[in-house]
Image (spheres, grey):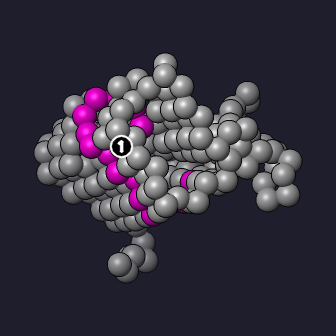
């Protein structure tokens, strides 16, 4: 799709109305979603703690054709969304934190790179803890090589794993390009 030459500048927002569509925007801060069937499209988010937070129990959220960067914890926190064609980069923390209740969750055609700028960071491309279920990652490029490797940008970026999973059920990882950190995929029961 064609992108407009100029994105509308907006501040942090909380969405509480089902079916809301927010597109063609440039935001500094965070978007909190407390509704179903929300669409975010064609955007840039210069994040705060999280770029986007999806509160528990929601579903049908579409997040596509965007860039999320410069946040301290994760680009997206929550479940119940489809994330498509996102560039997630240059942050202090993890790429995604797919965790919570709700669902299902699909992440596809995304590029996640250059994470872990924060002091003491050990960033993961995705970190899942707790009760997340029905999660699929496909056709993504998650670039999390260990610091000091020839393909890595070096300081200040620090990475741990492309996937860090502690619990969760029905989790599918298929047809992705994963460049691992300390671990490519790290799984534990809790």
Q: In this view, does 166 lie above or below 162?
A: above
Q: In this view, does 107 lie above or below 159?
A: below
Q: Which residue is drawn at 52% across and 58% down?
A: 176
Can residue 125 be seen here? The reply is: yes
Q: Residue at x 28, y 54 (%)?
A: 62
| Observer-nearest of 187 and 72 | 187
Percent position of residue 147, x then y: 80, 45
Seen as rendered, the residue at the extreme left is: 18
Q: Mark 1 points at which residue?
A: 135
Can residue 117 be seen here? The reply is: no
Seen as rendered, the residue at the extreme bottom is: 2
| Observer-nearest of 42 and 165 | 165
Magenta part, dominant SS? loop
Q: Is residue 4 covered in magenta?
A: no
| Image quadrant where residue 55 sits | top left
Q: Is residue 99 covered in magenta?
A: yes
Task: State which region is magenta.
Answer: 98-112
Q: Which residue is drawn at 42% across and 72% down?
A: 6
| Quadrant location, the N terminus | bottom left
Percent position of residue 133, x then y: 32, 35
């Amino acid at each position: 799709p064609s992108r407009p030459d100029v994105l509308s500048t907006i501040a942090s927002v909380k969405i509480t109305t089902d079916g809301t569509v927010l597109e063609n925007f440039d935001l500094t801060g965070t978007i909190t979603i407390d509704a179903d069937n929300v669409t975010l499209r064609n955007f840039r988010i210069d994040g705060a703690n999280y770029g986007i937070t999806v509160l528990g129990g929601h579903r049908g959220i579409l997040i596509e054709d965007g860039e999320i960067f410069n946040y301290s914890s994760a680009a997206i926190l929550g479940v119940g969304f489809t994330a498509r064609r996102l560039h997630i980069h240059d942050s202090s923390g993890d790429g995604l934190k797919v965790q919570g209740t709700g669902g299902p969750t699909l992440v596809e055609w995304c590029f996640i790179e250059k994470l872990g700028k924060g002091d003491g960071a050990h960033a993961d491309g995705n970190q899942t803890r707790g009760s997340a279920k029905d999660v699929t990652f496909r056709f993504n490029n998650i670039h999390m090589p260990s610091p000091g490797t020839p393909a890595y940008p070096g300081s200040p970026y620090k990475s741990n794993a492309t996937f860090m999973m502690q619990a969760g059920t029905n989790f599918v990882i298929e047809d992705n390009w994963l460049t691992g950190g300390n671990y490519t995929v790290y799984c534990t029961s809790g």
